[in-house]
Amino acid sequence: MNKTEKKKWSTKKKVVVIISVIIAFLLVAAIAGGIIALNIYCEPKEYSVVGISDATDRDATLVAHRGFSAVAPENTAPAFEEAGKAGFDAAECDVYRTADGVWVISHDSHTYRMMDKSAFVEKLTYDELMEFNYDSGSNIENYSELKICTLDEYLAICAEYNMIPVIELKGKNNTEHYDEIVASVEASGLSDRVVYISFHLENLKTLRNLCDATLYYLVHTIDEQSINDALSLGGKCGIDFNGNKEENTQEIIQQCIDKGLLMGAWTIDSPEALNRMLDCGVTLITTNTIKH
């Protein structure tokens, strides 16, 4: 090997080493960023509760987001009970189906963020899930050995406090079992009041084939496609959008209303945001903080 060949080989090696170092740095940065983001997501949110008398004297259907999660761990029986006691018109929940066919309430498909053991909700039986306890959420210290809430328990609480059940259909799984949800709602006596919401249009279409309940298509930003998608659901349908995005203007909200769509907004946590949404003609308000 002559000196020129040796020099070329060394240069190539340096390039490989530099590229390897850059890739390793990016991987470490991505992992670190992911861990930081996960910790932020898992950190319980703290909210300052606002009475509606301090916010507005106009009518609004107030929906407690995951129950009254400002005062009790989200999506638990105590959170729904506190929503009822606080006078909310409705309580929103998120549903998954266990491996043995029990519909339970959880925002996430995995228990990591809220419970003391980690597993995918749909991979476990109900009895296996009952071995898990909540270890996170608002005022968790007041709720020892708090267990996952079932759909039937949630519906019973809604009936007790005369709240509208607002049920979010999570993911794209188990649509063939939605008849079980409809049956549970009918058994609770709330089928004439229930509202179903989902980010997945096909979920709502499946529900429409099973019942004539009110359906809201969840979107981050309203556009022509989402308007047409919502309209495809037939009667008693609407759009439930992120009320904090500037793109969701009064003009496009009015366009939805003119086409006969019901309008909901999430997650509205200040009197100013509430009044702005009501001015735009939004009537279903999902909130963490504002109560009657």
Image (tube, grey):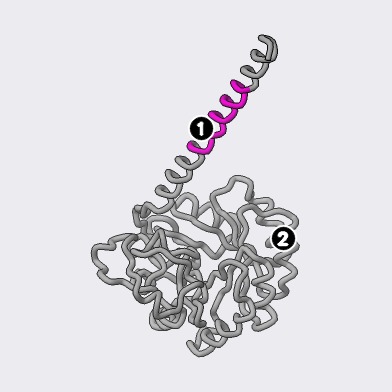
The residue located at (55%, 87%) in the rendering is: 183
Which span is picked out in magenta? 13-28
Q: Nearer the viewer, residue 108 or 33?
A: 33
* Picture quarter with the C terminus: bottom left
Q: Quadrant of residue 230?
A: bottom right
Q: Is residue 217 magenta?
A: no
Badge 1: few (under 14), some or many (20 or more) residues near its Cα, within 10 Å?
few
The single residue placed furthest to the top in the displayed view is: 3
Of helix, strand and loop, which mostly describes the magenta segment?
A: helix
Which residue has dot 2 on it? 227
Which numbered disc flags the more N-terminal residue, 2 or 1? 1
Element assignment for label 1? helix
Residue topped by disc 1: 25
Q: Which mark is residue 94?
A: none
Residue 192 visible in the snapshot: no
Q: Is residue 116 left or right of residue 29?
A: left
What type is the residue that disc 2 sits on? Ile
Residue 23 drawn in magenta: yes
Q: Nearer the viewer, mark 2 or mark 1?
A: 1
